[in-house]
């Protein structure tokens, strides 16, 4: 398939929206990472996402919407806590899991009785979804197991000639995928940490649990797969150990990633650094450990999945 690469313009967004409504695949920017979208109401369209990404069919997708009005067509109930979260954090990088209505094909949720919904804040994403007039199922626009795409060139690297349209916009803002929270349980559970932190969420709806390694893991099927992995071996370690560990790998091509300015910048750039270092054929990547609270929880969640070794001190 020949991929059309479109820059951002009114005309091109209309063109891409038309493609979505014709059940074609469109990669588009969001504030978190680039997404690979298809009409969430069409089983045929959604099937194409799994094929293009090489994604296991038991890993459910997030449905993206541009207005709250459509929500009741997709979900069986809207709990009060969801209303509060939506009021505070939508549009934005928060995905909420609801009970699914049958209007959403089973394939979207990989057979689960629930459905994940998010309203992105990126103007291009909102505009595209609105113009397409359909809810848009979209995982990150990378090949399965590759680091999530934070620049259009990453999407082109992974998906050129595998999708119908790629919208080429600027680098994304957050650089880490959305926070995912499940509100179908008595106590809400954060299944994936992201820019909207546990602390911020608890301020609005009270106590939430965090998915633990045992027990709740099965609730977010996506979390069990190898993820975010560069080809190089990733080692997490405190900054003070970098020099010493580097010396163990003399003769190898070793790269380092440290938290130089802020956690925001560190998180924003981590996936693109992984891709860059792969391109330059690094064999080892040493990455600085950061404290696991606030945004640090999201960063460490991704880093731990990419790492084959963690040196604590
Ligand atoms: O920021 C984001 O969320 C990006 C952009 C494109 O919006 N999307 C994204 O999608 O990261 P994806 O498919 O790469 O990750 C979706 C995560 C997976 O871990 C999946 O298992 C989980 O959400 N998920 C989706 N639906 C679910 C459901 N019904 N129950 C539990 N987990 C669900
Ligand atoms: Mg993904």
Image: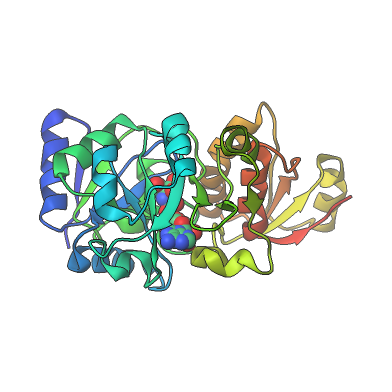
Residue 166 in view (yes/no):
yes
Q: Position of residue 26 (x, y in %)?
A: 23, 51
Left or right: 99 in relation to 301: left
Q: Position of residue 167 (x, y in %)?
A: 25, 41
Say which quarter of the image contains residue 214.
Answer: bottom right
Residue placed most toward the observer, 37 or 143: 37
Say which quarter of the image contains residue 249.
Answer: bottom right
- The quadrant of the rendered image in which ligand 1 is seen is bottom left
User: Which residue sits at x=56%, y=52%?
Assistant: 192
User: Which residue sits at x=62%, y=54%?
Assistant: 282
Q: Position of residue 185 (x, y in %)?
A: 54, 58
Left or right: 241 in relation to 23: right
Residue 233 in view (yes/no):
no
User: Which residue sits at x=62%, y=32%?
Assistant: 203
- The scheme the figure's colours follow is rainbow
307, above or below 239, in the image: below
Q: Position of residue 164 (x, y in %)?
A: 18, 55
Residue placed most toward the observer, 277 or 252: 277
Number of numbered discs? 0
Residue placed most toward the observer, 85 or 239: 85
Residue placed most toward the observer, 183 or 142: 183
User: Which residue sits at x=65%, y=36%?
Assistant: 199
For the N terminus, the image quarter is bottom left
């Amino acid at each position: 398939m020949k991929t059309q690469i479109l820059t951002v313009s009114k005309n091109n967004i209309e063109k891409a929206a038309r493609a979505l409504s014709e059940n074609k695949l469109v990669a588009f920017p969001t504030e978190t990472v680039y997404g690979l979208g298809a009409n969430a109401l069409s089983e045929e369209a959604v099937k194409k996402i799994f094929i293009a990404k090489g994604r296991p069919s038991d890993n459910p997708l997030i449905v993206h919407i541009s207005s709250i009005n459509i929500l009741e067509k997709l979900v069986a109930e809207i709990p009060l806590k969801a209303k509060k979260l939506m009021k505070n954090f939508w549009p934005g990088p928060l995905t909420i899991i609801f009970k699914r209505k049958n209007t959403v094909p089973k394939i979207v949720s990989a057979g689960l009785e629930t459905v994940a919904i998010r309203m992105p804040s990126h103007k291009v994403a909102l505009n595209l979804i609105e113009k397409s007039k359909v809810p848009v199922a979209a995982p990150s626009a990378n090949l399965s197991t590759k680091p999530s795409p934070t620049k259009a060139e990453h999407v082109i690297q992974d998906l050129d000639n595998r999708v119908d349209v790629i919208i080429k916009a600027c680098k994304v803002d957050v650089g880490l995928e959305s926070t995912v929270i499940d509100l179908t349980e008595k106590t809400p559970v954060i299944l994936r940490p992201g820019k909207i932190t546990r602390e911020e969420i608890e301020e609005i709806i009270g106590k939430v649990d965090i998915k633990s390694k045992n027990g709740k893991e099965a609730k977010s099927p996506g979390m069990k797969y190898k993820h975010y992995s560069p080809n190089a071996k990733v080692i997490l370690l405190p900054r003070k150990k970098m020099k010493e560990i580097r010396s163990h790998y003399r003769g190898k091509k070793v790269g380092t990633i440290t938290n130089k300015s802020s956690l925001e910048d560190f998180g924003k750039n981590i996936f693109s650094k992984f891709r860059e270092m792969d391109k330059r054929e690094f064999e080892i990547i040493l990455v600085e450990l950061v404290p696991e609270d606030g945004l640090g929880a999201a960063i460490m969640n991704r880093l731990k999945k990419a790492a084959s070794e963690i040196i604590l001190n």
